[in-house]
Image (cartoon, rainbow, N blue to C red):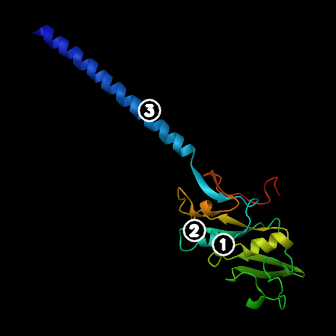
Amino acid sequence: MNKNAKEVSRRSLLAEGIRSFSLLCVGGFAGGMMGRSQSQRYCWQIDPHKCVMCGICATHCVLEESAVKCVQAYAMCGYCKLCTGFFDPSPQALNTGAENQLCPTGAIVRTFIEDPYYEYKIDENLCTGCGKCVKWCKAFGNGSFYLQVRHDRCLNCNECSIAIACPSEAFQRVPYDEPYLLKGTTSKG
């Protein structure tokens, strides 16, 4: 009797050891996968050097208001009196009248600094991400306006509908800890 109890004890000990080892392996594997997935998190962003300003960012986002907005690289901006990103190509006058502005929603705010310099800020609540200002700023200015996915708005869909439709493949996955591709800070210019 005492011998059987000892054998059962050995079996129980062996079974318990195998179960503990299995749980340890499963836990270690799951922990490793969690750490790996957190270190490899990515989000969507527009490469401003590939963007062709086609305008689909304004219409293909799953959100009612696109997560893509125009941003201004102030270090690159010329603070021009005649800003080609702000004014219509054939303005009637160089003032802030709606008929003179290129932006269909009036999302660019022009502020006088000193003669002949003006500052141009984007009102993100009005910006639709259409890219008209970006196109004309790049064509005749220094390209300080460019489009970026705003991550405070983006849902980070697994298959971004804008990325699928983007003709220049400017939409790409970037590391989550570096979510913006800032113009003027890379060697691409």
Q: Quadrant of residue 181?
A: bottom right
Secondary structure beneath label 1: loop
Residue lying farthest to the right in this orientation: 116
Residue 129: which numbered mark, if any? Answer: 1
Q: Is residue 169 left or right of residue 88?
A: left
Give the labeled residue for mark 3.
28
Q: Position of residue 23 (x, y in %)?
A: 35, 30
- Earlier in the chain: of badge 3 and badge 1, it is 3
Residue 79: which numbered mark, if any? Answer: none
Q: Height in image: 181 above or below 19?
A: below
Q: Position of residue 33 (x, y in %)?
A: 48, 39
The amino acid sitting under disc 3 is Gly
Q: Position of residue 143 (x, y in %)?
A: 81, 67
Give the labeled residue for mark 2.
61
Callout 3: few (<14), some (14-19), or many (20+) C-alpha neighbours within 10 Å?
few
The amino acid sitting under disc 2 is Cys
- Earlier in the chain: of badge 3 and badge 2, it is 3
Q: Height in image: 120 above or below 33?
A: below
What is the CA distance from the residue labelled 3 to the residue labelled 1? 45 Å
Circles 3 and 2, Cβ within 8 Å, touching? The answer is: no
Of residue 160 and residue 16, the one placed in the foreground of this image is: 160
Tell me the quarter of the image containing the C terminus: bottom right
What is the CA distance from the residue labelled 2 to the residue labelled 1? 10 Å
Of residue 46 and residue 14, the one placed in the foreground of this image is: 46
Q: Height in image: 164 above or below 123?
A: above
Specify whether residue 66 is in view: no
Q: Quadrant of residue 125?
A: bottom right
Circles 2 and 1, Cβ within 8 Å, touching? The answer is: yes
